[in-house]
Structures are given as structure tokens and as C-alpha cells.
Amino acid sequence: MVDLSQYLPILLFLFIALGLSVAFVFLPMGVSRLTGAHQPTAEKLSEYECGFPAFEDSRGQFDVRFYLVAILFIVFDLEAAFLFPWAVSLDLTGWAGWTTMMIFLAELAVGLAYAWKVGALEWE
Amino acid sequence: MDYATSLYLTGAEIGLSISGLVLLLVSAWGGARVTRLVTILAAAALFGAAIFTGHLFTELSVPAAGDAFGGLYRADDFSSFAKILIYLAVIACLMITPKYLAANGIYRSEYPILLLFGAVGMSMMVSAVDLITLYIGLELSSLSSYVLASFARDDVRSSEAGLKYFILGALASGILLYGMSLIYGFAGTTDYAAIRLAFIGGIETGALFGIVFVLAGLAFKIAAVPFHMWTPDVYEGAPTPVTAFFASAPKVAAVAILMRIALEPFADHVDSWRQIVVFAALASIVVGALGAIGQDSLKRLLAYSSINNVGFILIGLATATQLGTSAMMTYLVIYVVMTLGSFTALLMLRAEDGRPFETFSDIAGLATRKPAIAWCLLLLMFSLAGIPPLFGFWAKFVVFRAAVEADLIALAAIGIAASVIGAFYYLKFVKVMFFDEAEGSVVKTSPIGQWIVLILAGIIVSPLGYFLNGLLDAWSSDAAASLFYLV
């Protein structure tokens, strides 16, 4: 039988986190409604303006540079995903594991240097 | 694990990887000026790798050679044979490319580097004795291929070819991975030898599904019917030198992994995959032959021709014997020579204003305008049709001989009958070049690299090629023997 009482701290933590996050979201809304002027416009009610509108014609043209950044991001994001298990198991893999990861990092560095030099990182 | 041995056995791949990375930096800093230098250095690196692999081929006299990195990678005569063929094919692709790409304004130094990385991926594929190594190699070569297909990125057809190839290639990889996951689920290992041990008492239905999915995924990669539909579109849309590459080196690698996966982990269960291979072989031969008849585009025609040839190669696999495997290796060599020769000839046919010749009306009466190219094409087409005494006949002969000796007489008979259908369009090629009235356009002169490849291909497929027979036979049977060493 699992002793559920040992999970009490995490339960408390979740309740507190939930309460705090609800407060963070709704408190400013309530305060601003009570203290400020309420004048909604189309621009204010639209989603947070980042990237591009979520719903529109799927054939719309879209700057390829977004993809370039996204691809580079994924490469280095995955690198981090590799590094973590490598780091915690280094005592088992030893020098072979260390060397392999260094080779991998060097290859990524070459890729980054190439992307940098050909101007893939410049927005304009 | 002995690292020194591992590094020694994988020397060719390591050398190519390092050259690829260094050349990538050279190209980034050197810009357009170093494109030619990068091409030459890439060809030199491939040549070095071929020499090293040749050294391994002669040195590893025992058929079961060395396993590297804890049984993930194997260097044996089979892999060395396939690798040398791949490296030489890529060198030929590098030789025929520069002028064509330069004329279209797309000669960039990334091209040889992508070919180099593709070659690394392909040699990992043929050396893989573990499903994971196989997949990594396959993806490395496929990713290079997707980019190469859309190398003329301002050209709509090239972009379309790249996108189609990417989507269907990703689908094929997914199917392959699903099959691998089933095999892993039932065998509990990804290692070929261990898979074989796991299934020694019989094969479950689930693992059978795994084999079917793996075969389907690989059939995509070698463009065997019924998974061939992408081939004509991609071959037509991609720049012609890239098409020549697609039809040669990656096909060798994909056929080689198909052979290894069929004959190593599943060697005890030939009956469970033979029907699939027989079906794919016959369907490829028939569809390749019939599909080409209606084509007016020469590149589409050669795409169907390559589908047709894959069918003949698969007949060798259906035998599941050492003789059949050896016949496949011989066929692959001759096929690569014929394909590279044909595409090189196609590359050399450009009007004076730079427009490439694409249809039958373009090559009408070529014999009077460019007799040398026309005669080489005649040799290549007769050889592809399998007409003796040209070397293409020998390729078909060894495959059919193996099929007959393995008691697959019906298969051989249908294959021979269907190869007659295929002869129709090869002969049409020759008829249009030699007997039709020439039309206005003049053919531009071609660079020396393309002439070298075309003439070499012409010499090898001509009856002079039979002088190579002794060597080719010995090497093919060495390569085949190493696949059957454990039996």
C-alpha cells in the first residue's frame, strides 16, 4: 500500500501554485477594471501580437526566415536534450562518452559557424 | 571494445566526415571563389576513401571481417564492395556536374559537400548490422538528397521535386521505423545477429508485420513497384546531375541494406519475405517497361528504366542464395555504369543557347549532329535493353542464371519476357537518334569531365567490358560470400 501522506508537500505546493497563478491572472484584471477606464478596441481584444494570426488562409505567404530560426532553435534545443542525460551518466560512460559528446559539440559548432558566416542569423 | 580497431575499420567514413566538415568551413569563408577547389577536394577525399576501402577489401581475407563499436558497424567484403561502388559513382557525379550547374547559375560549393555527406550516410547504411545504425545512415543520406533535389531553388520543378521527395521520403522513413519498432518489440534487440537468434524457433505474426513494413520502407528508397510513384516526378524535376546521382549511388546503398537485412537477421525465414520480393521484382519490371513506353520526356523515361532495372536486381534477392547475391552485386556495378553513362549523355545534350534537351524531338537525328554522343548512347541503350554482346546482357544473364539454379524458373521466364517489352523504348531511343530527320538546334560543346565519364561508360558496356568479367566475378562472389559466412 502506497503511503499517500508522503505526497502532501507536493499537493500543498500545487494548491498554492494554483492559487497564486489565479491571483496573478485575475487580480490585475480586476484592479484595472476598478481603477482604469474601460475602452476595448479591436486591436486590444486581439491575441497577443507575436508571430502571425493563428487562423487565416493556409495558402498565405510566410517569411521563410521564421523557419530558419525555428530549425536552428530545434538543433540547439535537441543538443540540450542530449547534454542532460550525458551529463548525469558521465561516470558510467567515462572518457569515451566525454570524447563522443565533444565530437558532437564540435560538429554542431561547425554547423553554427557555417550558418553564421553565410548570414542565416541576420534578420535583414 | 577496442577503439583502435573500431576507428581503423571506420576510417573511410571518418575521413569523409572530417573532410566534409572542413570543406563546409572553407566554403563558408571562401565564398564563390573556392567552389571549384571544394569540388576537387571532395572528389579527392572520396578517392582516398575508395582506396582505403579497397585496402580493407583485399586485407580482410576472411569473409567475416571486423565489427566496430560493439557490433553496430561491420566492415566486410560486402560493405567494402558496395562502398567502393558508391564512392566511384559519387566521384563520377562530381565530374559531370560543374559546367551544368554553372550554366544555370547554381554552382555553389554546398553541392559537393552535400554529396560528401550523402556518401558518408550511404557507407554507414551498407555497413550497418544494427537497426539504429541503419536508420542513422539512411537519414543522413536522405537529408542530403532532399536538399540536392531542390538545389535549383529558383526553379519551380526542382522545388517541387525536392518537396515531393521530402514528403514521400519522410513517409517511407516513418514506415521503416514502425517496422523496426515491431521487430524490436518482438526480438527485444536491434542487433542483426541477435534478431536472428531471437527468431530461431519461428517468427510471430507481429514480427512478420515488422518485416513487411521494413520491406515497404526500403522499397520506397529503391523505388520498387508499388512504391515507385515519386520516382518519375523527382527524376524529372531535379537538376540532371542530381538525377544521375539519385539513380546511381543511393540505389546501390538501398539495395545493399535490403540484401543485408533480408539475408542476415531473416535468413532463416526466407519464405516470409520471398513472396514480397518476387512480387516487387515482377511488378517493377512490368511497370518500368510499360510506364516508359508513353513517355516523351527523356528523364522520365530513364526514371522508368531505373525502376525496371531494380526489378531485375530484386530477382537476385528472391533466390536468397549466394549465387543470387553475387549476381546482384555484378548487376549493380553494370547498372551504375549504364545509368551514369546515360544521364551524362543527356547532360551533354544542350542547345547552343543552353537549353537542355528534354524530349525525343530534341534528339531527332542526333547521329548527324553529334555522332560521338549518339554512338555512346546507342551502346548504352542496347546494353540497358540487354542485347548481347553488350555488357548489360551479362548483368541480366547472371541474375537469370541464379534464378534458374534456385528453381525460380517461372520468375526467370516472366522476367525475360518482360525485358523484351523494355527493349521497345530503348530501341526507340536509337531509332529517333539515327533514323529521324534532324531539327534545327545545334549541340553545345561539352566539358572534358563529362566526356571522360561518358567514354568510360561506353567502353565498359561495350564488349570490351567482358575483360573485366574475371575480376568482377571474383569480387562479387567475395562480397556475396561474406553475407553468407554465418550460415
Image (tube, rainbow, N blue to C red):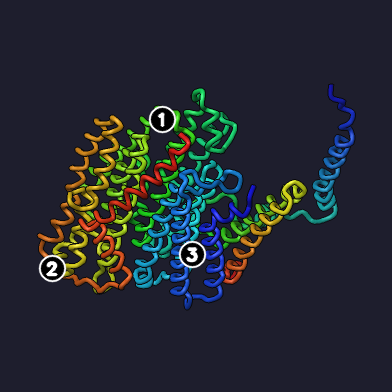
Does residue A46 appear in this view?
A: no
Mark 2: amino acid: Thr
Q: Between disc 2 and disc 1, whose residue precedes?
A: 1
Residue located at (63% from left, 50% from top): B2
Q: Numbered disc 2: what chain?
A: B
Mark 3: amino acid: Ile
Answer with the quarter of the image where residue B182 lies: top right
Q: How many marks?
A: 3
On residue B270, the disc is: 1
Instruction: Give x and y (percent) for residue B246.
Output: 38, 54
Residue under circle 3?
Answer: B113
Would residue B430 appear left or right of B358 to someone viewing this image? left
Label 2: state its secondary structure. helix
Q: Numbered disc 1: what chain?
A: B
The outermost residue toward the top is A1
Mark 1: amino acid: Val
Per the model, the C-alpha gap separating discs 3 and 2 is 39 Å
